[in-house]
Every structure is written in C-alpha cells, then in structure tokens.
C-alpha cells in the first residue's frame, strides 16, 4: 500500500500531555498554549478533560480553558468525557468533540476503573446517545492496544472486539493507543490490519508512546497500513506512569519532521509548533524532549549568532 498524501495530526499536549504534571499549570498558560497550537494550523486539539478534579486535579479548570481560548475556524476542540456528567460539562463548554476511553486489556480495565471491558463500554452508551442527540463528534480511545503493564501481551482479537464495540456506539473516530509504548512495527501492522476489517481505515488513528523509542517507527508502519490520523504531543509533553522516568507521548515536532520528509501534507506550520514547544517547556520548567524541536531551535540560534 502506498503512503497517504495527507494526514491529520491530533495535538494532545494540552490534555494528555499536561494532565500528569504535578504542579498545577496556570489556566492562562494552558489557554496560551492552545492558542499557539491553533495558530500553527492543527485541525484537532485535545483541549480539556471533564473528569472529577479529585482524580485529575490538573484538569479542574477545563471550563475556564475552553471559555478563554481563541477558537480558530476549522479546528476541532476536543474534551475527554468519562460519563454523562462530564459530557454535560463539555457541552456547556462548547466542545466540538467528546472522547470516551476504554481498554483492550481486561486486566487494565479492572485495575484502573474496577470493571470489565464490557461494563466500561456499557457506561458510555448514554454519553454516545447524548453526543448524537446534540450533534457532537464522538471519538473512542482504546488504551493498551499493543501491550498492558499488568497482563503483558494483549491478543489482537481482543483489540478487534473493543473496536467493534466502540463502532457499535457510533464513534466517528477510534484511536488505537500504545499506552505503555511497547509496540513494534510488526505488531502495529498486525493490529491495524485486523481492526480495519471491522472499522473504516480512514477513521482509525494511531496514538503511540515513545517509552521504548519505537513511536516513529510504529507511525511509519501505520502509514504503510493506510492510517491517516495520528496523535502527538508538543515538546513530547506527558510521561508513562507505568515506566518510571520514561517518555510518554511521541513529540509533535518529531512527527511533523517525519511527515515533511516523506512529502506528506499536514497543513501544520512546524516552526510555530517548535516555538509552542519551547514556550510550554519553559513555562512549566520541563525539559523539551522533542529531538527535532531541540535540533531546529539550536539551528535557529546558530543562524542568529552568525548573522
């Protein structure tokens, strides 16, 4: 299969990337980050999470963030909604898309939300109905699709089963997430090849973590399977809670550099993303883990010094 001519990059830094930061990131900084990313041209930005502040205190200001951003025409602003109460908050905040999340691993589902996969999916039925009744896009995210910190390998049929369940809920898009970053290109292709038999290829997305340094290789493998949507986090924001000290989400700058090198259109201004990555890294006192971002910044500084 030939590579896609264009892909959509879903920027998840403001939500998935920041949610595990221990020190509270000021609301104004979150708004500034999202606005910078909007200006860079992203078609979709994961901006907030309407979960209980007791569980994710970093996301407690979701309504304020959504109210404060400068919305760009053509950009979808997504919010995580684990239940109907979260959905109602997202609706009030004018989210364009709501995201529900399950797991392909039974052990992960039991350990994290104290219920089976089937029970977790049934909990999303009222959220799915509400999204459809209110004309909001519904996205389903499947964690541990390429491996689990508790049970290890996750059978490919288990991933296919959850994709089918999410499809039955009416999801417009479904994310195949390598939550702990253990996936390799071979497994990536096997999983994606299998799930495309039950859900439209063009509506599937790859969400890869770089814990073992495989994220870009897995993205390339996904491209070979015809996948056209990928998630990434500016400056590599986010960690892997199951592997101490490990990086989490693949850095957006690195993904964009790859796509540019392959001649694949993204519609995103890499220079603006590099600047946004430097902004958020310095704002929260966190190292920028994007290799392409750091290299491009160093190159820019070198050019400025020589002028």
Image (tube, rainbow, N blue to C red):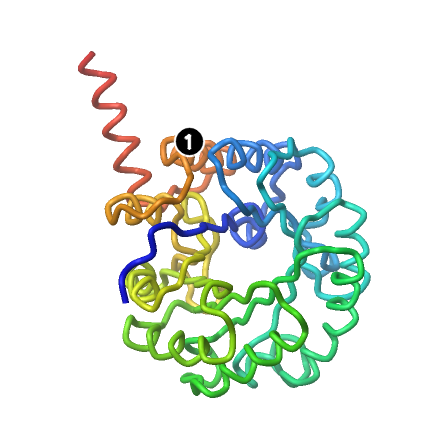
The residue at 27%/25% (across/down) is 300
- SS for tag 1? helix
Give the percent coordinates (x, y) of residue 62. 71, 46
Is 215 situated left or right of 25 in this image?
A: left
Q: Quadrant of the N terminus?
A: bottom left
Disc 1 crowd rating (10 Å Cα; few below 14, some 14-19, many 20+) is some
Exactly how many numbered labels are in the figure?
1
Is 27 situated left or right of 129 in this image?
A: left
Give the percent coordinates (x, y) of residue 213. 29, 61
The residue at 55%/47% (across/down) is 44
The residue at 59%/45% (across/down) is 23
Give the percent coordinates (x, y) of residue 282. 45, 33
The residue at 66%/37% (across/down) is 27
As drawn, 261 above or below 116: above
Q: Would you say residue 222 is visible in this rendering? A: yes
Reading the image, the residue beneath label 1 is 272
In front here: 14 or 191? 191
As drawn, 240 above or below 279: below
Location of residue 189 (image quadrant): bottom left
As drawn, 89 above or below 28: below
Q: Would you say residue 179 is visible in this rendering? A: no
Location of residue 307 (image quadrant): top left
Residue furthest out toward the top: 307
In front here: 218 or 24? 218
In front here: 246 or 122? 122
Give the percent coordinates (x, y) of residue 306. 18, 15
């Amino acid at each position: 299969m030939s590579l896609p001519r264009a892909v959509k990059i879903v920027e998840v830094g403001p939500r998935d990337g920041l949610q595990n930061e221990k020190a509270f990131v000021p609301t104004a900084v979150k708004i500034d980050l999202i606005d910078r990313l909007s200006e860079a041209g992203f078609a979709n930005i994961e901006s907030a999470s309407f979960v209980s502040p007791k569980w994710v205190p970093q996301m407690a200001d979701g309504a304020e963030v959504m109210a404060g951003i400068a919305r760009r025409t053509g950009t979808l602003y997504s919010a995580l909604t684990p239940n109907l109460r979260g959905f109602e908050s997202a609706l009030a905040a004018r989210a364009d898309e709501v995201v529900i999340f399950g797991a392909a691993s039974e052990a992960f589902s039991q350990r994290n939300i104290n219920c089976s996969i089937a029970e977790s999916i049934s909990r999303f039925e009222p959220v799915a109905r509400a999204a459809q009744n209110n004309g909001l896009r519904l996205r389903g995210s499947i964690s541990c699709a390429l491996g689990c910190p508790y049970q290890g390998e996750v059978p490919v049929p288990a991933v296919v089963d959850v994709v089918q369940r999410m499809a039955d809920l009416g999801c417009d898009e479904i994310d195949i997430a390598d939550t702990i970053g253990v996936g390799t290109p071979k497994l990536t292709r096997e999983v994606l090849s299998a799930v495309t038999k039950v859900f439209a290829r063009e509506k599937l997305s790859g969400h890869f973590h770089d814990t073992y340094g495989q994220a870009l290789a897995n993205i390339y493998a996904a491209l070979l399977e015809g996948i056209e949507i990928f998630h990434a986090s500016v400056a590599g924001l986010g960690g892997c809670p199951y592997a101490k000290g490990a990086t989490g989400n693949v850095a957006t700058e690195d993904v964009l550099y790859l796509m540019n090198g392959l001649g694949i259109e993204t519609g995103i201004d890499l220079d603006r993303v590099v600047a946004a990555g430097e902004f958020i890294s310095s704002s929260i006192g966190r190292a920028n883990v994007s290799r392409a971002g750091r290299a491009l910044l160093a190159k820019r500084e070198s050019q400025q010094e020589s002028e």
